[in-house]
Image (spheres, rainbow, N blue to C red):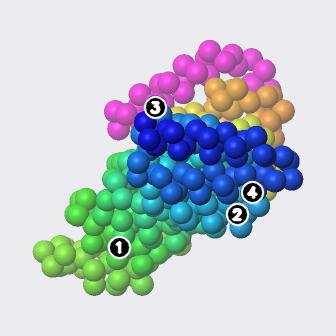
Amino acid sequence: MSAAETLLVPELTHALETMSADRQVEAARRIAELFLAGASQFNDEHVDLFDRTLAPLIEGLPTAALASLTQRLAPLRNAPRDVMRRLAGDPAIAVAGPVLTRCGLLDEADLVAIARASSQAHLFAISGRPGLAPAVTDVLVDCGDRDVVRNLAMNGGAELSRSGLAMLLARAVSDGVLAEKLARRADVPPQGLCSLARAASEAVRERLLAAAPDALRVELAAIEAAPDAAEAAAQVEAWRAARALRWAGKLDEAQVLTFAHRGRSKETIAALALICDLSIDVVQRLANDDQPDALLVLCQAAGFSPLAARCIVVAANRWRAAPSTDATLAQFDGLSSATAQGMVQFWREYQRAA
């Protein structure tokens, strides 16, 4: 037995033997102090022993005690891994924040899981971490509020996927600060900034031009702005809201039905597009048709109940000012799931070809 183990085992044994329910905080504190005092000397087996010992103890600790523990453990490279995962997902940002910001033991899957289920404060802490992978930044882009995406855009070590970058550019249509930050990123292609200049409001265009590279500024200034930036921004927000619901596992028939009942046409279209794996443009064209057949097909392909499909079509007819007929709605009863899936697959192929 090494010298470190000779000191370690008796201390741990004593801490566990003297622990009682009403002394859980004290027991956890003693074990944590023991780990902190010798962390630099411990090997993997020692750390694993502390992990298995401390992990169940911290469940009963008050927030203040957990926050104090987090502040001290987060900077350590060999902190107990399971303990750090538990602290990173704590609902209190005072506990989770230091781990999300500083701890290098969290992997991509840990960060994705926390980002999907936690508060905006948690997402903000994650958005500043160096070396963020696209799987993580995708969640932040879809689920994060204004401050989160602005902080992410400032993070040069955050890698963006194509879809993540597209969503950031789309969100910048109504956010001049975000537009500025994207203009300064090396991974944003000129065509992306041109698209942003075309869709953005005048105020956003001015900030984009001021921050854009000199070589691109003249080209951006010559681009004619879209006539209705507010409409574009509303469409982007509907798309983002639907994607955030999907990350949270809440994008289902009930949610689409709620959107439809409340007259939120953009959110209804966006939700159907995501569920059916179609672009929002394709579903928008289908939904704007005078006949509701296409919406019935989408609902059947999505596995919605006949009642939900009827409610969605009726709601769509209201915002399209189109008549609703029982004969058309009755087509749902004769539409098989296989037929609907085949039609949606055809639309996907058409979408890819276009």
Secondary structure category for the residue under label 4: helix
Q: CA distance from mark 1 to mark 4?
A: 47 Å
Q: Is residue 132 above or below residue 348?
A: below
Type of amino acid under label 2: Ala
First of labels 4, 3 by sequence position: 3
Segment colored magenta: 330-354
- Which residue: 47% across, 65% down? 149
Residue tagged 2: 65
Disc number lying in front (3 or 2): 3
Residue 199 visible in the snapshot:
no
Q: Is residue 184 above or below residue 59?
A: below
Query: Where is residue 84 shown, x and y percent of the image?
Result: 56, 49
Type of amino acid under label 3: Met
For residue 342: magenta? yes
- Which residue: 50% across, 24% down? 345
Secondary structure category for the residue under label 1: helix
Q: Quadrant of residue 17?
A: top right
